[in-house]
Image (cartoon, rainbow, N blue to C red):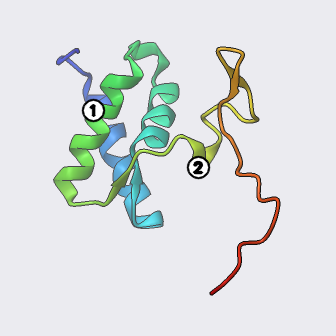
Amino acid sequence: MRYDYSTRLRDDVSSTVCTAFKTAGIVNVTVVAERIRVRNLAENVALEDVEHLVLQAAQLIGAAIEFDALSNGLALSGNDAVDGDEPAIDTPAFSQPAPIQ
């Protein structure tokens, strides 16, 4: 983990976190960090480090946070197999409706 982040990167984190909180009411740490990392590729900072900065900034302003890569298409889509045996995301199969008692 690096500790010598540029002022530009820190300012970008701060402003992006504030904007995300004001528009959505919640900060999705994974999505916000990836956007910041892509905008600052020249900094060569790992996603995990940017996530840490985003988390700190969100906590500093008291924002609600979430860690959901699925919400904005960052995770793989589809039902790709893990280890070739099972699907990564399995949908339940309901063959018959459950009786209501």
Query: In this rendering, is residue 81 above or below 63?
Result: above
- Relative horizontal placement of residue 23, taking residue 21 as reference (left or right): right
Marks 1/2 in contact by CB < 8 Å: the verdict is no
Mark 2 Cα-neighbour bin, 10 Å: few <14, some 14–19, many ≥20: few
Q: Quadrant of the C terminus?
A: bottom right
Viewer-nearest residue: 66 or 31: 66
Question: Residue 91 got which mark?
Answer: none
Viewer-nearest residue: 92 or 62: 92
Q: Name the residue: 41% across, 23% down.
A: 47
Viewer-nearest residue: 17 or 8: 17
Horizontal and vertical percent for residue 84?
72, 15
The three-letter amino acid code for the residue at tag 2 is Ser
Q: Quadrant of the N terminus?
A: top left
* Dot 1 or dot 2, earlier in sequence: 1
Question: Residue 52 got which mark?
Answer: 1
Question: Label 1 vs label 2: CA separation?
Answer: 20 Å
Mark 1 Cα-neighbour bin, 10 Å: few <14, some 14–19, many ≥20: some
Q: Name the residue: 21% across, 58% down.
A: 61
**Residue labelled with disc 2:** 71
Q: Name the residue: 42% across, 35% down.
A: 33
Secondary structure of the residue carrying tag 1 is helix
Horizontal and vertical percent for residue 64?
31, 60
The furthest residue to the bottom: 101
Query: In this rendering, is residue 45 above or below 86?
Result: above
Viewer-nearest residue: 35 or 9: 35
Classify residue 53 by image quadrant.
top left
Secondary structure of the residue carrying tag 2 is helix
Horizontal and vertical percent for residue 52?
27, 32
Q: Name the residue: 81% across, 66% down.
A: 96
Classify residue 89 by image quadrant.
top right
The three-letter amino acid code for the residue at tag 1 is His
Query: In this rendering, is residue 77 above or below 83?
Result: below
